[in-house]
Image: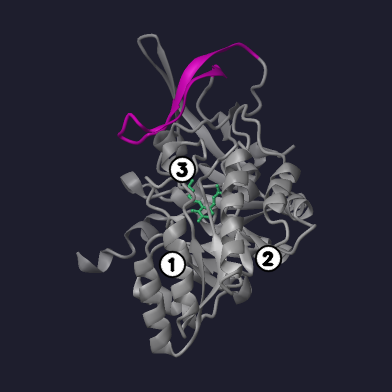
Amino acid sequence: MVDFSSLAQKYGTPLYVYNFDVIAQKFVALKEAFKARKSLVCFAVKANSNLSVLKHIASLGAGCDCVSIGEVKRALHVGIPKYKIIFSGVGKRDDEIEEALKNDILMINLESEEEMGRVEMIAKALGIVARISIRVNPNIDAQTHPYISTGLHENKFGVDIDSAKRMYIQAKNSAFLDPVGIHFHIGSQITQIEPFREAALVLANLVRNLKSLKIDIKFFDIGGGVGIQYKDEITIPLYDYAQAIFSALQGLDVTLVCEPGRYLVGDSGYFLTRVLYEKHNGHKRFVIVDGAMNDLIRPSLYGAYHEIEAFGKEEGETSLADVVGPICESGDFFAKNVELPRLEHDDLLVIKSAGAYGFTMSSNYNSRNRVAEIALEAGKDRVIRKRESFEDLIDLEKEYV
Ligand code: LLP
């Protein structure tokens, strides 16, 4: 049991806390599920890009899936081997492609024919061969929130099977492209196994097809997307997930690559915020806290549910309340109509499952300093990002006034 009260006292609030031991457990469980095959786990950096989190993940043996050159550089900075780094994303600038190629990372995931043209041109100018993978959009409904569903043709991601095939043939005939991988990522927070099974089957068939054209795919990248339990979702058993993929891959000698983000770090994280005051507008009860949507935007943006615990106040009568932040928007809330005990100034709320897409999606809106991040490991706590100061806020502007 984590003593959130001491942590809040020691480091102040609002605060992100990540339990590194939980991340390690999640990683080991995933590797265990995949152990019947060669596999490479590339953590989706966008979920949590703190350098110490990445270093911890590197120490476990994971690589990184990056969607900007900034993320690639973070991964390299903490010593993730270049041969474990993938560069994905629907739009990459020329300078990002060039830097990724110069760094000789494992592969660039391509999402359009135009992008392949740019990568080929840049590789040619550098006099190197670019290892590439193609993100196939299998037109499968991941049955998740529309904002985080990515595997349908109506989504902007990847290319359809026919275009992919054409691109592979073109890449094989290019002196500057080496088509080593195939990729799908159909969405996030997925709790059904079927969409994964279907996507894997579709892509495995394409791999067989390509083999007959003497195009030998070495890396089969199944993306991320495995959901976690925020409320009462029934998550996918990892063993079943792995078996579904394995059965699609029968007879194929490929290294399995996966890109989990939320699965690895989501459950490890807590967002700590203190009550400023309670307020009633008519019958409506509001608990106003010192954290806000700029710190954790998931409830505002997706209507996402995060369990909230009133720390040390487990007993006693409860009533319905909205938990809201100080930002000047009605959309600034962490929860609506949740049962909470009567709360007072300085009471601590612990917002759970906040390790993924929490801090990374935070901003300085309303000139609020971004909060500190803390790691818990083997019973010890330490700062992994200090709280921003007012000086940090104005640092890039002050010389111009
Ligand atoms: N690979 C690719 C190419 C991705 O686009 C993503 C996530 C992942 C892997 C990792 O997916 P995960 O395992 O975390 O589901 N901000 C949203 C989630 C956006 C996900 C974007 N792509 C949220 O807070 O729910």
- In the picture shown, does residue 327 fall above or below 358? above
**Of helix, strand and loop, which one carries label 2?**
loop
Q: Nearer the viewer, mark 1 or mark 2?
A: 1
Which amino acid is tagged 3? Ser
Residue designated by label 1? 166
Q: Nearer the viewer, mark 3 or mark 1?
A: 1
Toward the top, the furthest residue is 283
Where is residue 387 shown, x and y percent of the image? 49, 53
Left of 218 or right of it: where is 116? left
- 3D distance between C-alphas at marks 1 and 2: 21 Å
The label number, if any, that marks residue 254 in the structure image: 2
- 3D distance between C-alphas at marks 3 and 1: 25 Å
Magenta stretch: includes residue 176: no
- The answer to whether residue 94 is visible is yes
Which amino acid is tagged 1? Arg
Question: Is label 2's Cβ within 8 Å of ligand 1?
Answer: no
Residue designated by label 3? 149
Q: Earlier in the sequence, mark 3 or mark 2?
A: 3
Magenta stretch: includes residue 335: yes
- In the picture shown, does residue 193 fall above or below 258? above
Where is residue 37 shown, x and y percent of the image? 76, 60
The residue drawn where x is 72% and y is 56% is 250
Over which residues does the magenta segment extend?
316-342
Which amino acid is tagged 2? Val
**Residues at marks 3 and 2 touching, judged by CB atoms closer than 8 Å:** no
Residue 48 quadrant = bottom right
Colour mapping:
one colour
How many numbered dots are placed on residues in this image?
A: 3
Instruction: Classify mark 2: residues with Cα within 10 Å, few (<14), some (14-19) or many (20+).
Output: some
The residue drawn where x is 50% and y is 84% is 129
Q: Earlier in the sequence, mark 3 or mark 1?
A: 3
Instruction: Classify mark 3: residues with Cα within 10 Å, few (<14), some (14-19) or many (20+).
Output: many
